[in-house]
C-alpha cells in the first residue's frame, strides 16, 4: 500500500535507460478518470519504448501498461466504476469517443488515443490515474499477478486469434515462445485449433506440448515453411517474434488464403517476394492489442479455460532488475512487479 499521507512510491525513467525509485504526490483523478491502487504490473517488451526513449517522452515517466489494482477514487463522470472494484489498465489509455475512427466504432485506432506509460504515467507504481473508458474489469477468480500479463500479452494474442479467418480444427501456428507466444499457444488450443508452436531449439518441445501445442517446429533445425506444408499448410501464423526474417520464413508455409499476423514489434523488415504472396493469395497483416471489451473477454475466457501466464514476481523496487531480465530474454515468461 502507499504510505499514509500524500505521496506514493513509483519507479520512473529519468533519462534513456535509467529507472529510479521515487515518491510522487498523490493527486485526485480528473473528470472521466479514476485513481487505482496498483497491486501488480507486468513488464512488457513495449515498455522499452518508454525506457529507451523509442517514443518521444516527457521525462520523467513511469512505464508499465499491464497494471491491476483497486479503484480508490472515482472522478466526475466515471461513476460506472466503483471504489474497491478491481480493474486492469492496458496499453491503450482510452479512446476519445469523438474522432472519425471512434465514431466508426474503431476504438483501437482512435486518433487521440493516449498510451499508458508513454503519454502519461503507467503501472510501475503504487498508484495510477487512468481514463475510465480504457479500463478492463478483472474477474474475482483471477489473481492480480496472473491477470496483469493478460492485459497486454494476453489481450494481443487473444484478440488476434479471435478475429482470424480460421475454423475449429484448422492449423494455426504460433511463432515465438515468449511472453506473448506462451499465451497464444494456450488460447489457440482452447479455441479449438490444431496448434503448431515454432521456436528455436529442441529443448522447447516438451514445454510447448504442456502449453497446448500438438506439434513443434524447431526453426533452428528445420524450415518452418516446409514443416507447415507437411502438416497441410497453416491457416494462420501468429507471429509473436520480433525477428523479421523468422516471420518471413513462415509465409510460404501458409495454405492458400492463409495469413501471417504480426504482433511483435521489431525494427527488422519482413522480406518476402511478391510471388510468395501472389500464389495462394497469402497475406501479412498487423494487429494492435484490442478494445477494453475484448480485454474483459480475454480475462473471462482465461478463467473459463484455465489459461494462466507463467510468471516470476519481483517487488516494485526491483523494477530495474525485472526490466533488465525481460530485455535479456531471460524472463520465463513474464516478469510481474508486486506492490502489496
Ligand atoms: Zn477517438
Ligand atoms: Zn505490452
Image (cartoon, rainbow, N blue to C red):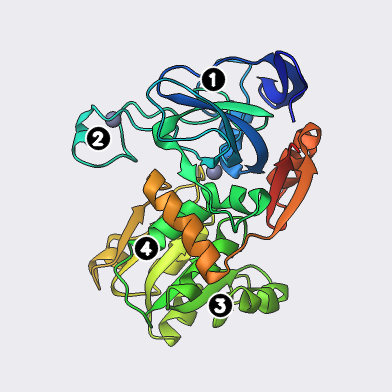
Q: Quadrant of residue 340?
A: top right
Q: Which residue is mark 3?
A: 213
Would residue 270 be visible to someone looking at this image? no
Task: Pick whichever of labels 3 and 1 is earlier in the sequence.
Answer: 1
Task: Give the number of marks.
Answer: 4
Secondary element at tag 2 = helix
Is disc 4 surrounded by few (<14), some (14 to 19) or many (20+) residues within 10 Å?
some
Nearest to the eye among marks 3 and 4: give it. 4
Instruction: Name the residue: 74% across, 41% down.
Output: 338
Instruction: Name the residue: 61% across, 30% down.
Output: 63
Percent x, y of residue 100: 19, 31
State whether residue 307 is above or below residue 320.
below
Mark 1: C-beta under 8 Å from nearest atom of ligand 2? no
Report the front residue among 87 and 182.
87
Q: Which residue is mark 1?
A: 57
Q: Compute the Cα span from label 2 to label 3.
A: 37 Å
Question: Which of the four quarters of the rendered structure image does ligand 1 lie in?
Answer: top left
Instruction: Name the residue: 63% across, 70% down.
Output: 220
Q: Which residue is mark 2?
A: 102
Mark 4: C-beta under 8 Å from nearest atom of ligand 2? no
Percent x, y of residue 177: 61, 63
State whether residue 312 is above or below residue 1.
below
Would residue 229 be visible to someone looking at this image? yes
Report the front residue among 9 and 281.
9
Mark 3: C-beta under 8 Å from nearest atom of ligand 2? no
Is disc 1 surrounded by few (<14), some (14 to 19) or many (20+) residues within 10 Å?
some
Q: Is residue 76 left or right of residue 325?
A: left
Task: Pick whichever of labels 4 and 2 is earlier in the sequence.
Answer: 2
Q: Compute the Cα span from label 4 to label 2.
A: 21 Å
Q: Compute the Cα span from label 3 to label 1.
A: 40 Å
Mark 2: C-beta under 8 Å from nearest atom of ligand 1? yes
Q: Which residue is mark 4?
A: 162
Amino acid at each position: 500500500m502507499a504510505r499514509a499521507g500524500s505521496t506514493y512510491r513509483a519507479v520512473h525513467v529519468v533519462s534513456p535507460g535509467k529507472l529510479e525509485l521515487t515518491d510522487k504526490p498523490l493527486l485526485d483523478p480528473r473528470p472521466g478518470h479514476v485513481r487505482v491502487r496498483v497491486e501488480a504490473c507486468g513488464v512488457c517488451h513495449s515498455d522499452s519504448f518508454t525506457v529507451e526513449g523509442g517514443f518521444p517522452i516527457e521525462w520523467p515517466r513511469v512505464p508499465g501498461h499491464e497494471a491491476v489494482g483497486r479503484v480508490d477514487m472515482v472522478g466526475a463522470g466515471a461513476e460506472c466504476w466503483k471504489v474497491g472494484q478491481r480493474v486492469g489498465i492496458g496499453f491503450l489509455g482510452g479512446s476519445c469517443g469523438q474522432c472519425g475512427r471512434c465514431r466508426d466504432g474503431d476504438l483501437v485506432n482512435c486518433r487521440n488515443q493516449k498510451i499508458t506509460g508513454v503519454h502519461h504515467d503507467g503501472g510501475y507504481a503504487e498508484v495510477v490515474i487512468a481514463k475510465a473508458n480504457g479500463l478492463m474489469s478483472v474477474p474475482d477468480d483471477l489473481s492480480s499477478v496472473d491477470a496483469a500479463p493478460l492485459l497486454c500479452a494476453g489481450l494481443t494474442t487473444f484478440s488476434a486469434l479471435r478475429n482470424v479467418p480460421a475454423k475449429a480444427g484448422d492449423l494455426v501456428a504460433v511463432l515465438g515462445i515468449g511472453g506473448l507466444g506462451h499465451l497464444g499457444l494456450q488460447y489457440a488450443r482452447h479455441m479449438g485449433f490444431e496448434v503448431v508452436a515454432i521456436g528455436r531449439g529442441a529443448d522447447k518441445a516438451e514445454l510447448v506440448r504442456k502449453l497446448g501445442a500438438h506439434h513443434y517446429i524447431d526453426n533452428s533445425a528445420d524450415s518452418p515453411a516446409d514443416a507447415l506444408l507437411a502438416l497441410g499448410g497453416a491457416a494462420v501464423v501468429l507471429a509473436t517474434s520480433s525477428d523479421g526474417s523468422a516471420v518471413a520464413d513462415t509465409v510460404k508455409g501458409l495454405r492458400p488464403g492463409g495469413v501471417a499476423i504480426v504482433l511483435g514489434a521489431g525494427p527488422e523488415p519482413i522480406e518476402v517476394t511478391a510471388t510468395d504472396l501472389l500464389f495462394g493469395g497469402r497475406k501479412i497483416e498487423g494487429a494492435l492489442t484490442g478494445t477494453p471489451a475484448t480485454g474483459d473477454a480475454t480475462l473471462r475466457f482465461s478463467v473459463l479455460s484455465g489459461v494462466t501466464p507463467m510468471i516470476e514476481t519481483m517487488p516494485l523496487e526491483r523494477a530495474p532488475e525485472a526490466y533488465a531480465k525481460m530485455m535479456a530474454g531471460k524472463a520465463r515468461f513474464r516478469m510481474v512487479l508486486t506492490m502489496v
